[in-house]
Image (cartoon, helix red, strand yellow):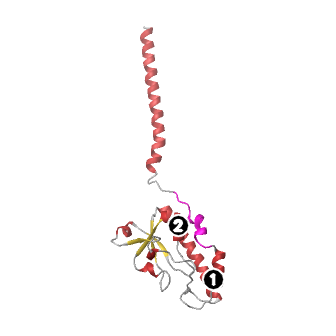
Amino acid sequence: MEIIIGVVFLVVLVVLALYIGLQKKGVVEDDVMPMIHTSGIYSVIRKSPRENLHPAKPALDDLRAFISVQTADTGGAPLSGNDKVTILTHYQERLEAMIALIEKSDREGVQRYQVVPCRGEGPCNGFRDKAFFVTREDIYHHPELIPPFYPGCGCALKPETEKMLSAETEHFRIGQDDERFRLPSWKHIKKVNG
């Protein structure tokens, strides 16, 4: 009889150990798996383009020195002292707006931007002929692709949506070797209207 009680006791202990072991394994899986499943898509954490901006873009002091000695813009329009201040302020505001847009778009997973050309005549005329784009990876490696390209430039970036990407439009990537797709030199200057 003692042997039967001993065997039953041993079987109960083994079953209890298995039950507890399976419960702990289930807890570990429940703790780990939902974190993966509920996290949604995995996004790449990107560094702000602000960190790599210089020397790709001219420093504020360099721009100020360049603008201060100009008497006319690239198109020949005369520049007053107020025009020069406006041009410099415009450049700073546009650059900050584009960096903020890229930072916001990074949180939304945007991978490609359409280049919206500025109005009027100027060094960015070539961007009006076709639809140009730049990828987020391009911006990471080449922050000079962030508008404005020169003081007074009104170009901008527009985050592309899936609808824009699937449109039957021919897109060209800026910064390619072909001369038509090169960026204008930052040493242009354009009078800012308004």
Q: Quadrant of residue 152?
A: bottom right
Camera-side residue: 6 or 148?
148
Q: Residue at x 54, y 77 (%)?
A: 185
Q: Residue at x 48, y 74 (%)?
A: 182
Measured as percent of width and height from the top left, residue 132 is found at 43, 73
Callout 1 crowding tier (Cα within 10 Å): few <14, some 14–19, many ≥20:
many
- Asked if marks 2 and 1 touch (Cβ < 8 Å), the reply is no
Q: Which residue is mark 1?
A: 67
User: Amino acid under label 2?
Assistant: His
Q: Which residues are magenta?
A: 45-58
Camera-side residue: 83 or 4?
83
Q: Secondary structure at mark 2?
A: loop
Measured as percent of width and height from the top left, residue 129 is found at 40, 80
In this picture, residue 117 sits left or right of residue 83:
left
Quadrant in which the N terminus is drawn? top left
Q: Which residue is mark 2?
A: 142
